Structures are given as structure tokens and as C-alpha cells.
């Protein structure tokens, strides 16, 4: 071959390779911002809840549905939309989720009717699928060296948004009309939509097959029955007919659904993949981590707001109580790249084990130092630090056990397990604080022992996550020689070769 021809061939090969778009550097920040906004929506109404009956002319039970309904719709839509994204395009489904979030925010901002507010909050909850979809897009689009730190940040947004959202919402409630926070969330949702349209490319990775309608309906029925029983059991009575009926019904539906999923050609959830030890134990650990994380968020603000007459309360304002969680949110931002480095060097299994240990230490700090504000903040921040490491390691572990074509659905299930853990935590915390009480200054309040018991239970959940992690198959971290769109050390076998 003539040298000039060889030079010409190499030049044309170079020019034929598309240069990366200047916008590509903004993909991770935009996706992370979307995750933070969605996570903020989950805690947005918490400071408002005591005032909702007066503002809307409703009952405290109806007001509680502003939180419960987001939990239900988030749990149902997260795995479903993850699967839809795998099949029809993750960016397309991401845009749809953000559109639903924006519509729900506008609906809440434009009304004071409790029924319409609950409907709007249901739409906001459905957008929780943004986080696993963002993780899937990162895996598909980024070079291997950037995947782990980017996924760590994306996964941590769930905790970051929760920690940041509470004080911000408290400031709005105290200083502005309460509808303002919903208008602000609508504006943020619209900004997210525009940023994704401008920056985020559509992933080329697709899962072939038909959408499993019956499997989706079965999963929805089982989840709604289970979560309704968990979240409403304290009000209805744990041995009441509705609670037991829902639990029994969800169990029967789950068994029938599982049998159907194992027999269908294109299942909503590939149970054979989900049963692999790496995936199964990671999802179990996610449930316990979700429980341990949520206890920190639920009790910190309430504990410091308890009146001084209780002997342990600090009588803090809503804003001060919300700000107690802010250092934890900042620590999650700072620690997400650290977690990625731990996962890259020692493996995500080691990172998750370390995270569980840190959370146990955090709750022990809280157990012994619950009398001064700065020590309460210190304990809460340690727990948040452990959560940051855990939430960063969980998606990396999931992706070690699933093919690239099922990333969205698999991470959706993992996020679902965190949500189930949070629902269980909410039920346990409500039951403890409602039953371990005494009378102080003429009002019934939880005792200090009630809070200490919650800290022990949460530490036990973190220990359970550590046990699940210990049984995960050991896997030596691999250096990045993976193909584009995969993570070093994770499974990238096409679904057709998985031996379904």
C-alpha cells in the first residue's frame, strides 16, 4: 500500500469518528440536578403537614395522605418506568417523568382542596423514577472511568434532596404563602425539562420484546396492598381486618405474579436475574439501608422541636429543626466521589459494608448524645455520611449482576426496595412515638426512651444490611478495560445470552 494512501485512510477514519458534543460535560450535572429536585419533592410537604387541616379544611388523616400517596406512586412507577425506559428509550421516559412532576406541582400550587392536592402529590411521587433512569443513562453514555463516580453522585441525590428540601420548605412555610413552594417546584421541574432536552442524549441501548402489561398490573396490585397496609396499619390497627386483608391479598397476588413472570417470554421483572445472590442480597441490603436512613430524617426534626418541658426537647423552630439535616446533605455531596473511589479500589461490596458500619456508629452517637443541639447534628451527619456511601455503592452492586439492557428496571427495583424500607420505617417510628409517651406541661409527648428505642432499631437495620453484605459473593475490582457504556467489573452480557 502506498504511504500516501495509508495517511489518507487514517485521516478519513479520524474525521469519520464523531467528536464528543461540548454539552456532554453537562450530562451528569443535569441528571444529578434532576435527581435532587425529585428528592426534594418527597419531603416538600413535611413542614406543612401540621397546618394542612387548618389550611384546607380537612382532617389530619387526610393530610397524612400527602406523604403516603407519593410513597405509593413512587414505589409503583419506579420499576415500571425503569422497564419502559429500557425498552423504548430512557431519555424519552425521563422527560415524561419530569413532565408529570411539573404537572403535579402546578396542580398543587393552584388549589387548596385536599383531594386535588393528593392527586398532585401522586403525580410528583411518580417522578421518583428519574433517579434510576439517570443512573441507566450514565451507564450507557459515559466512558468506564467516569461511570462509578457519576453513578455515586446520582444515587446520592435521593438523600441530598431529602436533607436540603426540609429546611428550604420550612423557610417557605414560615415566610411565604404555602402555595409558593409548589410554584417553585413547578419552575424547577420545567427547568429540568429544558436542560434534559438541551443536554442529555437518547441512549441507544434497548431491550427487545413486548411490554408486560399483566406483569405490571400484578406488581402494582401487590405493591399497593403491601404499602397501604404498612403505612396505614398504625391508624387502622395492625390486627384489623383491612390491614390483615391487604397483607394477605398482596401475598397471594405476589405469588401468582411471580409464577406468571417466570413463564412469560418478556417479563416485567426478570426474576431469574433478580434471584442471583448479587442482585437479591443487594436489594435486601437496600431495604435495610432505606429503613436506617429514613429514621434519621423522620426523628431529628421532631426531636429538637419537642418543648423544653419534656426534659430533653430543645423547643427549636421548624426552620432550625430543618437546618439540623443540612450538614448531612452537604456531607452526602462531599462523600459521593469518595465512595466511588472506595468502590473502584476495593469493590462496592466493601464500600457498602463500610457504609453500614458508619451508620451503626452514627446511631450509637445519637443514642448517647441526645441532649445538645450540636451533638444531635453531629450524630445525624454521621448517619448521613454512611447513607451517602451506601447509596453510591448499591447501584454499582446491582450492575455487577444484570445485563446492560436491564439496567433501568434493575435499578428501579433497587430504588423500590429503599422505598419499602422507608415505608416500614415510617410505620415503626409512628407506632413507637405514639405509644411510648408521657404527659409534660399538660400535653402528651413521646418520652426520650421512645427516641432512643428508634435509634437502636435503626442501628439494628444497618447491622442487618451489614449481614446481607457479608453474604454477597466476593468480587475483585477490575481495572477499566470494559467496552463503552459498561462499568469495569460489571456484567455486560446481552440479555439473549443470559439463559432465560
Image: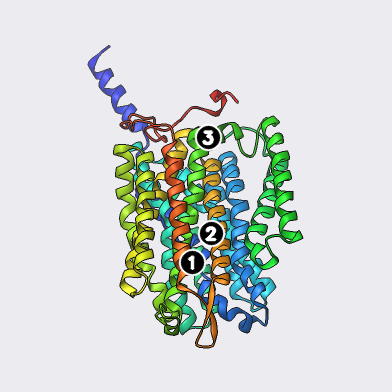
* Residue that carries the numbered disc 2 in the rendered image: 425
The answer to whether residue 127 is left or right of residue 329 is right
| Residue for badge 1 | 298
Q: CA distance from mark 2 to mark 1?
A: 9 Å
Residue annotated with mark 3? 405
Q: Where is residue 466 drawn, in percent x and y?
A: 42, 45
Percent from the top left, x then y, of residue 408? Answer: 53, 42
Q: Residue at point 31% right, 72% down? A: 374
Above-or-below relation of 313 to 379:
below
Labels 2 and 1 touching (C-beta < 8 A): yes
- Answer with the quarter of the image where residue 159 lies: bottom left
Q: Is residue 389 above or below residue 369?
A: above
Of 493 and 326, nearer the camera is: 326
Residue 305 screen position, x and y as percent: 44, 78
Instruction: Give residue 246's position: percent from left, percent from top.
Output: 72, 54
Q: Give the mark nearer the N terminus: 2 vs 3.
A: 3
Looking at the image, is mark 3 or mark 1 earlier in the sequence?
1
SS class, disc 3: helix
Name the one closer to the observer, 86 or 434: 434
> Which residue occupies 24% across, 19% down?
4
The structure residue drawn at horizontal position 56% and vertical position 61%, both measured from the top left corner, is 428
Q: Residues within 10 Å of mark 3 (few under 14, many from 20)?
A: many
Asked if the residue under mark 3 is in contact with the one under mark 2, i.e. CB atoms within 8 Å, the reply is no
- Measure the alpha-carbon separation of dots 2 and 3: 32 Å
Amino acid at each position: 500500500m502506498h504511504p500516501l494512501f495509508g495517511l489518507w485512510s487514517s485521516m478519513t477514519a479520524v474525521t469519520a469518528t464523531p467528536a464528543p458534543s461540548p454539552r456532554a460535560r453537562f450530562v451528569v450535572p443535569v441528571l444529578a440536578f434532576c435527581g435532587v429536585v425529585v428528592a426534594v419533592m418527597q419531603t416538600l410537604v413535611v413542614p406543612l403537614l401540621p397546618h394542612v387541616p387548618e389550611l384546607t379544611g380537612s382532617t389530619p388523616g387526610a393530610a397524612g395522605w400527602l406523604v403516603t400517596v407519593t410513597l405509593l406512586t413512587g414505589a409503583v412507577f419506579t420499576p415500571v418506568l425503569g422497564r419502559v425506559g429500557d425498552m423504548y428509550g430512557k431519555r424519552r421516559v425521563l422527560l415524561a417523568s419530569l413532565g408529570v412532576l411539573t404537572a403535579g406541582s402546578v396542580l398543587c400550587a393552584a388549589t387548596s382542596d385536599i383531594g386535588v392536592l393528593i392527586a398532585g402529590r401522586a403525580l410528583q411521587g411518580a417522578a421518583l423514577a428519574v433517579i434510576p433512569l439517570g443512573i441507566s443513562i450514565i451507564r450507557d453514555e459515559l466512558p468506564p472511568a467516569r461511570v462509578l463516580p457519576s453513578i455515586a453522585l446520582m444515587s446520592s441525590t435521593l438523600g441530598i434532596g431529602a436533607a436540603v428540601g426540609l429546611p428550604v420548605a420550612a423557610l417557605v412555610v414560615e415566610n411565604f404563602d404555602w402555595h409558593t413552594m409548589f410554584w417553585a417546584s413547578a419552575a424547577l421541574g420545567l427547568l429540568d425539562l429544558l436542560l434534559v432536552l438541551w443536554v442529555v442524549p437518547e441512549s441507544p441501548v434497548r431491550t427487545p420484546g413486548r411490554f408486560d402489561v399483566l406483569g405490571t398490573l400484578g406488581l402494582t396490585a401487590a405493591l399497593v396492598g403491601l404499602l397501604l397496609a404498612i403505612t396505614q396499619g398504625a391508624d387502622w390497627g395492625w390486627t384489623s381486618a383491612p390491614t390483615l386483608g391487604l397483607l394477605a391479598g398482596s401475598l397471594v397476588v405476589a405469588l401468582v405474579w411471580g409464577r406468571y413472570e417466570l413463564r412469560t417470554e418478556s417479563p416485567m421483572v426478570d426474576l431469574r436475574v433478580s434471584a442471583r445472590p448479587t442482585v437479591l442480597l443487594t436489594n435486601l441490603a437496600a431495604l435495610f439501608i432505606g429503613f436506617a436512613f429514613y429514621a434519621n430524617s423522620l426523628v431529628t426534626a421532631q426531636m429538637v422541636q419537642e418543648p423544653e418541658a419534656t426534659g430533653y426537647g430543645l423547643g427549636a423552630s421548624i426552620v432550625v429543626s430543618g437546618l439540623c439535616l443540612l450538614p448531612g446533605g452537604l456531607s452526602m455531596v462531599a462523600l459521593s466521589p469518595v465512595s466511588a473511589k472506595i468502590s473502584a479500589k476495593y469493590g462496592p461490596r466493601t464500600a457498602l459494608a463500610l457504609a453500614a458500619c458508619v451508620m451503626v456508629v452514627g446511631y450509637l452517637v445519637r443514642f448517647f448524645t441526645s441532649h445538645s443541639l450540636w451533638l444531635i447534628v453531629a450524630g445525624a451527619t454521621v448517619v448521613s455520611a454512611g447513607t451517602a456511601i451506601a447509596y453510591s455503592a448499591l447501584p454499582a452492586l446491582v450492575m455487577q449482576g444484570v445485563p446492560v439492557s436491564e439496567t433501568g428496571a434493575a435499578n428501579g427495583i433497587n430504588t423500590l426496595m429503599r422505598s419499602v424500607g422507608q415505608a416500614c420505617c415510617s410505620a415503626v417510628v409512628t407506632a413507637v412515638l405514639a405509644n411510648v409517651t408521657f404527659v409534660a406541661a399538660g400535653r402528651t409527648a413521646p418520652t426520650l426512651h421512645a427516641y432512643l428505642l428508634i435509634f437502636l432499631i435503626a442501628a439494628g437495620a444497618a447491622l442487618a444490611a451489614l449481614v446481607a453484605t457479608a453474604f454477597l459473593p466476593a468480587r475483585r475490582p477490575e481495572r477499566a478495560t470494559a467496552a463503552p457504556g459498561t462499568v469495569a467489573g460489571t456484567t455486560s452480557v446481552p440479555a439473549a445470552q443470559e439463559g432465560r
